Image (cartoon, helix red, strand yellow):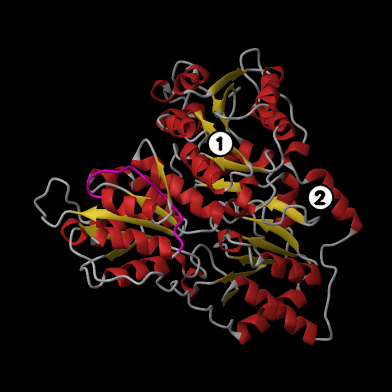
Amino acid sequence: MLVAELVGRRLVDLGADHVFGVVGSGNFHVTNAMIAAGARFVAAAHEGGAATMADAFARVSGRVGVLSVHQGPGVTNAMTGITEAAKSRTPLIILAPEPPNPRSNFHIDLREAASAVGAKFGRVSSAVGALDAVADAHQTATAGVGATIVLALPLDVQTEQAPPMRDRPPTSEVPASPTPPLPECRALADALVRAQRPVFIAGRGAARQPAYKSRAALVRLADRCGALLAVSAAAKGLFTSDPWYLDVAGGFASPLAAELISQSDLVVAWGSTLNMWTTRHGRLVSPGATVVQVDLEPAALGTSRPITLGVPGELGQVADVVEAELVGRGDWRSEGWRSAALRDRIAAEIRWRDVSYVDESTANGIDPRTLSIALDDLLPSERTVAVDSGNFMGYPSMFLSVPDAAGFCFTQAYQSIGLGLASAIGAAIARPDRLTVAALGDGGMLMSAAELATAVRLGLGMVIVVYNDAAYGAEVHHFGPDGHPLDAVSFPDTDLAAIARGFGCHGLTVRTVDDLTPVRDWLDGPRRAPLLIDAKVSSSRGAWWLEEAFRGH
């Protein structure tokens, strides 16, 4: 057995059951070894798409993702997707072949490249140490909140004879989380006792797959102290169906959510750094509010804003310890925010679709709010929504409901457009039991159009909604009001439905709600190929969240 084959088999033994990539000479043997050991290989059209597919698969499935690429350009083609994964702390292993000769035209400094985008780095330096190197990479990827790691596979080491391999190597063990510090937990309990209007804001750390172990503990503690529940955008869906759920905080927040959060006297962040997007550049949190941050990683405490108290520890454990402390204080409870009148108001007003608006549809374009509400009613509720970046992104993010946190795939840590289609493909592979909905802008769609061929080849019955304003809308609405020329960011209308049909998709052009009628026929059919909806949207103004973001600059 070659070292390359041993690496592939070892990864499968450690639980990697899918590998995404584009195969070249440098990753041919390691990829085939994973396939031979039982993993499914998903071939993408481009390494950039493969990286984002692997990222989304890991997010939605809760299992480690694996990306396999060719040396040199295979790695650099994938770098935007790797950067997004690294910034999102996705548990992802990148198998990166490495030419041993620095003079090779394929040579890049993999260690420096990984460091530059915030990824971890490892190397299979010898045949003897190959098993341990792979196990170390797997543990790095999966321990704690997760990490993205570039595992260098030198070409000369790959072709060495591997040492004997046990039939089933033991699974890499994830270290147990340290016990939460009792003084800080008691201080959080004190803050909850003092608070009259507490709100919990859960972030990516609370929504990590699998099983959202912290969710039940957070809900129990919130029920005890009368707290309202909100999330950062990355954790959308975490508290779906809870009557005290305000949905997303920050720029996406509905008017009622923003009103209630801004009136809170205690904000407790669970696995969220309360960054500028979650707090509307700090304006969403009252200046007089006590701010507490709970995070598994002590280094994350206070990184985005000043906090009153930082509590390191696993979120569910901290919540349990704090609740036990409150039980020990005479079974302390508080109604906090919770009144029947507020519960009814949340039920009636918290969703964006329940906020009244003037429909700005025209003869040539549909209001993106009207489009999104119609799709929310039309598509099955058991869905996964994957959202690309751009001016449009608030509409599918906030007007399309999701059943839980696994139903929302939000690749926005790097804010790159063009990732949405590939992330939807990865999500669809992770959850084939749900309808996957890709929400894209026309710019991001055209950047990633090659992956339509991947979706068709895989037979993915997914819906691709393109909010098509024939422009890079964020730039139009950013610079247009100041009178700047917009020729560089505005384009002739493109028939994206025809392009999709050329790849083998079903294609539909939509300018009115009535144009969506054929979607029902597709939903009732076999769904053997994707349906792309080229929605010509009205674009007289920027999205509300974009206007909010501009006010922060």
Is residue 363 placed above or below 60 in the rendered structure? above
User: Residue 403: image x %, image y %?
Assistant: 70, 48
* Quarter residue 94 falls in: bottom left
Q: Is residue 511 left or right of residue 89?
A: right
Please name whichever residue, 505 or 235, is drawn nearer the observer in this view of the structure: 505
Q: Quadrant of the N terminus?
A: bottom left
Is residue 19 found inside the magenta-colored segment of the image? yes
Q: Which residues are magenta?
A: 15-26
The reply to whether dot 2 and dot 1 touch (C-beta < 8 Å) is no
Q: Which mark is residue 346?
A: 2
Asked if residue 470 can be seen in this view, the reply is yes
User: Residue 145: image x %, image y %?
Assistant: 50, 66
Q: Residues within 10 Å of mark 1 (few under 14, many from 20)?
A: many
* Quarter residue 516 falls in: top right
Please name whichever residue, 126 or 278, is drawn nearer the observer in this view of the structure: 126
Question: Mark 1 sits on what residue?
Answer: 438
